[in-house]
Image (cartoon, grey):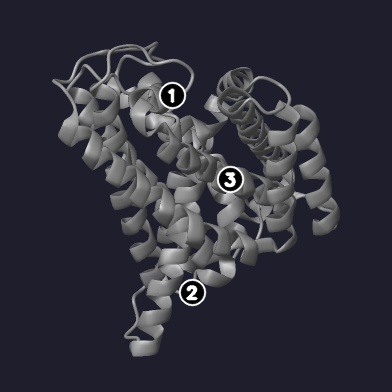
Amino acid sequence: MLKLKSPNFSDNLLSVKNSIKISLVYIGIIIGAGFASGQEILQFFNTNNPKSIIGIIVCAFLFGLISFCVLSIILRTKVTSTTQFFNDGTFATIINWLIIGFMICSYVAMVSASGAIFKEYFNFPQILGVGIFSAFCLIIFLFNARGIIILNSILTPIMIIGVLLLGVYKLSTAAVPTMASMQMIHQNWLISSIVYASYNVLTCVSVMTALRAYIINLRTVIISSIISFIVLLGLLLTMWLMLKTSTGNLGEIPMLTVLHSLRNFYLPLLYIAMLTTATSNGFGVIHSLPINSKISAIVIALIGVILGMLPFSGIVAIAYSMFGVLGLGVMGYILYKQIFGSLSPKNSK
């Protein structure tokens, strides 16, 4: 079983720094176009049902719990790849390729969304938005794990602070909350919480194993997980409350409808959210493929350019339906491995 040691000041400082870096990458994975647009929150959490607040708290707790389990398993077993995380063998190989499929779908969805924004809000050709976004991603890919850490260390805090500030302004000037038009995926708040959290597990495993060098001790694991829980809870609640202030059909990007007068401030935040999620998913694919990382980076970028011309909503619908069960299964496996793996004799030393 993992134990806390008595560190000196420099060890404490390094643990905190690494915890912040890891949590920012983890948050960056989750706050993609579906999250930042408000679409996922509308679909999973009924803005007219007070119990949805409980669901949001449970969901944020699951995000923190998943982070803790994945990081502590990586620390305990010293794995550096997805297949090692799932104990190698045929089962691990199958799971690895399924996760790669999901991450490619997620990456392409972000690229597609960037093209849609260029077309719908700036009247530029969609291919221009897709090309620029893919070029950004390729540059980050070529810097490997360091590029992902630097990108998320800069952009994720901007996204977090921006959403919270806009939320405070919107809620302080909003009228009496009403019910927004929506199509719920699940009516039960507990099921919604579990299913929504499970979708984000798949990318987490691949990216976090690549950040093994930053997971130096149990203190890093605990602090990072707590930060992730608190920040994601704050973002979920803020966006849920903002969506609750609007009525009628909120369209494909609900947050831009809710923040109509402030859309010029929110569009950059949405773009940042797409970029952090796209680069994390793309990096997860590159780290999981058994070929040269630079070649993988170029291939992933080209796939994004080609498939990024497909409609964003269609890609998201396919990814959700195909990989929902896989996410639940992987989350169950992580919890099982954390509980029973840490209790085994060889891990209790």
Viewer-proximal residue among 119 and 152: 119
Label 3 Cα neighbours within 10 Å, binned few <14 / some 14-19 / many ≥20: many
As helix, strand or loop, the secondary structure at mark 1 comes to helix
Mark 2 and mark 3: span between their CA atoms? 27 Å
- Circle 1: residue type: Gln
Rendered location of residue 287, percent (x, y): 71, 54
Residue 158 appears left or right of 97: left
Rendered location of residue 336, percent (x, y): 45, 45
Q: Residue at x 69, y 50 (%)?
A: 136
- Any part of residue 70 in sight: no
Question: Relative to 346, does residue 115 appear above or below in the rendering?
Answer: above
- Any part of residue 35 in sight: yes
- Circle 2: residue type: Ile
Question: Relative to 118, does residue 313 appear above or below in the rendering?
Answer: above
> Would you name the residue on which mark 1 appears?
39
> Would you name the residue on which mark 3 appears?
275
Q: Decide: marks 2, 3 in contact (CB < 8 A)?
A: no
- Circle 3: residue type: Leu
Image disc number at residue 110: none
Foreground disc of the pair 2, 1: 1
